Amino acid sequence: MNEQQWKQLLRVVAGERVQPLPVGFIIDSPWLPGWAGHSITDYYTSEKLWLELNLKAMRQFPSVWFLPGFWSEFGMCTEPSAFGAKCIWHEHDLPFAEKTVETPAQMAALRKPNVCEDGLLPFMLKRLEHTREGIEAEGHAVRFAVARGPLNIASFLMGATEFMMALKESPQEAHAMLNTITEFLCDWLRLQKEMFPTIEGVFMLDDLVGFLGKDDFTEFALPYLKRSFGAVDAKVRFFHNDAHGLICAPFLSEIGINIFNFSFNHSLAEMRQLCGESVTLLGNLPPRDVMALGTPDDVRKGVRAMLEPLADKRGLILSVGGGMSPKTPTANIKAFIEAAAGAA
């Protein structure tokens, strides 16, 4: 994000009305390489190409807030690699991290990685370090420390089904595992902030919280999310969960979250009522069925329909209910921006 966009984002988070209504999209490797005509592996392995494609999107859609902006990542392998997960790479598909934890004893014995040395983390930071001059030459800056959340990482290391069962069958070991992962996340977010002083935001993704009931959320998710988000002093605490979001919504303010990206299955009006006024909503067009696979007219109609029930449009960034889906075409992005510009 450039300085003007960042200041506007802070105004929105503070509850001010920004006109025209801001448009923001989460972009990363599932969409960006394919949109620009390159393979996913090329995107991961070439710092030059990575920078060029991020700048290409920002130049083509200059009014859009791309979030978190210059996201240095290796798909779902990023954090699991630091815990020793074997990473499997595909030329035109997202990488996959194999499981490393199978038993309650292994959950309890999980060791905290060294964020300066382990897995792909040093390569993430070096990518940003090597491209920082090019990023700043375009008027942008690295604004967010980024990580996947504690339950999300646990599900990669153990398997989603196996970890969910462990919450009930081995709760003590589950807490031990989550505590280790959270200590790792605090180290990782602090290191990013230390290396890039322009960082004033935290962006965390954890879809697994959408599979928990209220009691399990308050026991196994809330305290670890709160510790992770509080690891660094940040003006923006941005949470992505595009699974079921009704359970976590009332607790976001307590956690310290002030931007929430959630499933398109929940309306903006419903989420506003649950989150309260202190949380900025980022959404909420269906990312695949409308934004990627629909026509430009479908997109325009969808934007108008999602806004219609809202009398008060403060604390709102228009987006899709999740990240930008693969194969989302340029024409549909332009239609979304046009519809947002015409919204009252």
Image (tube, rainbow, N blue to C red):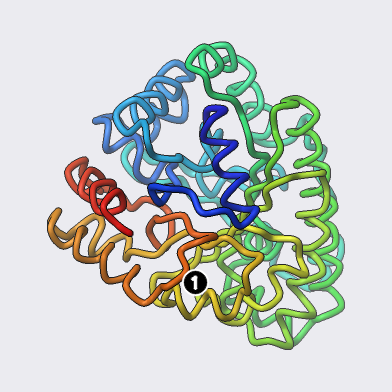
Q: Position of residue 108 (x, y in %)?
A: 85, 66
> Does the image show residue 329?
yes
Could you tell whether 299 is left or right of 83 in the image?
Answer: left
Question: Residue 27's image quarter?
Answer: top left
Q: Amino acid at mark 1?
A: Ala
For residue 85, above or below residue 2: below
Which residue does the image show at 75% across and 63% down from the upper left?
225
Along the viewing direction, whichever of 51 and 90 lies nearer the viewer: 51
Which residue does the image show at 52% across and 76% down from the upper left?
271
Along the viewing direction, whichever of 275 and 83 lies nearer the viewer: 275
Q: Position of residue 136 (x, y in %)?
A: 56, 16
Which residue does the image show at 59% across and 67% down from the upper left?
159
For residue 252, above or below residue 332: below
Question: Residue 57's image quarter?
Answer: top left
Q: Position of residue 140 (x, y in %)?
A: 53, 23
Q: Which residue is mark 1?
A: 243
Question: Residue 126's image quarter?
Answer: top right
Could you tell whether 81 is left or right of 337 in the image?
Answer: right
For residue 14, above or below residue 162: above
Along the viewing direction, whichever of 308 and 118 lies nearer the viewer: 308
